Image (spheres, grey):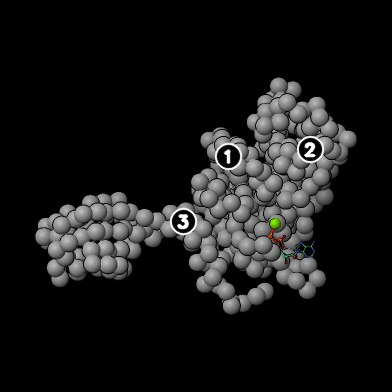
Amino acid sequence: MTGPAGPGAAPEVDAAAAPAVDPAEEEIARRLAARPESPAVWCADLHKRYGKRTAVAGVSFTVGRGEVVGLLGPNGAGKTSVIKMLLSLVRPDAGEVLLLGRPARDPAARARVGYLPELFRYQPWLTAAEVLALHVRLSGASVPDGERRACLAAVGLADRARDRVGGFSKGMQQRLGLAVALVARPELVVLDEPTSALDPVGRADVRDLLLELKARRVAVLLNSHLIGEVERVCDRVVILDRGRVAAAGSLSELLGQRELRLRLTGVGPAAQARLAAAGGLTRDGDESYTVALAGDRPDEVPALVEDLVRLGVRVHAVEPARISLEERLLGILRARDGGPRP
Ligand SMILES: Nc1ncnc2c1ncn2[C@@H]1O[C@H](COP(=O)(O)OP(=O)(O)O)[C@@H](O)[C@H]1O
Ligand SMILES: [Mg+2]
């Protein structure tokens, strides 16, 4: 694994000299053999307590190869704790983790994972180029000079390569952290709040980087408070609250309920019934109707309009709408308020 807090890759273990196989690992290997393509991240029933405080209370999810998954939730929900358990930086009290189809502690898996921690500090006397070179060496990968420079350029640090990181702003350090996470051609990238110190341009840069990773089928697990950004780049979202998964799914699953706002005149009882059949119907004013569409058929809207016209309705406006991920997230968290605390 490459990353500022990562211990780097341990030497390859000689299979012949390795100790007898642990039955738990053997069980994992058996399960893996049954999978067509092992996901980038697979974790099951992770638990973690710090003293009396439960940080994580039974978290399971997967990140498929090439998939971009957002990890969301309020402060203290357990996001960073989950990430650290995935990367073996914190030992779970219970639960299992596989990275790229291998046990999380296996150096062969960790060498293919890039990680940007939430909090980190580099050796202030090193230059940006030296920090990158150090982490490439730790990862055991061989990355030519030109590619390393391109990586610094991709995070907007092309002209700061020879400057000491002790003089970098927080945002520049975060950009360098991103370069470190990306430089050793990872198959999985784990980013814990990569844009917390970045200006709007920096955030847009990160979004472009994420889209590029997605295009290259690199799997990404992204913890960010910038929900708009998550919504733009993520295929799926896992929402944590008080150490548990409060909701998970693709954006269309989570935001699935589409709304249709209509302005109509001449609505008779038959048309009213047709509207109600399409989903939850509310009348907001004389001519304004909102339908929370129940179905997910692509031709739902034209079919409804066609029927309304046939029933003598005059259709002045039809405006599809969908709630934002932010609204959905707040809805999920508020609905859980007063629920059990771990
Ligand atoms: N090293 C630690 N020692 C004690 N408590 C911790 C430690 N790390 C996290 N916690 C606690 O675990 C809970 C989850 O923290 P964290 O995983 O950092 O949440 P998030 O990243 O979602 O904000 C919090 O209540 C936090 O105070
Ligand atoms: Mg955190």
Could you tell me the amino acid type at mark 1? Ala
Checking the image for residue 204, the label placed there is 1
Q: Residues within 10 Å of mark 3 (few under 14, many from 20)?
A: some
Comes first in the chain, label 3 or label 1: 1
Question: What is the number of callouts on the image?
Answer: 3
Q: Is residue 157 above or below residue 279?
A: above
Q: Secondary structure at mark 1?
A: helix
Task: Name the residue located 61 percent from the left edge and 66 percent from the top edge.
Answer: 241
Q: Position of residue 276 (x, y in %)?
A: 25, 68
Task: Name the residue located 73 percent from the left edge and 38 percent from the top edge.
Answer: 172
Could you tell me the amino acid type at mark 2? Phe
Comes first in the chain, label 2 or label 3: 2
The picture quadrant where one finds residue 220 is: top right
Q: Position of residue 105 (x, y in %)?
A: 75, 50
Q: Closer to the observer: label 2 or label 3?
A: 2
Q: Is residue 319 left or right of residue 8?
A: left
Comes first in the chain, label 1 or label 2: 2
Label 1 and label 2: CA atoms lie apart by 20 Å
Q: Are marks 1 and 2 in contact (CB under 8 Å)?
A: no
Q: Secondary structure at mark 2?
A: loop
The picture quadrant where one finds residue 200 is: top right
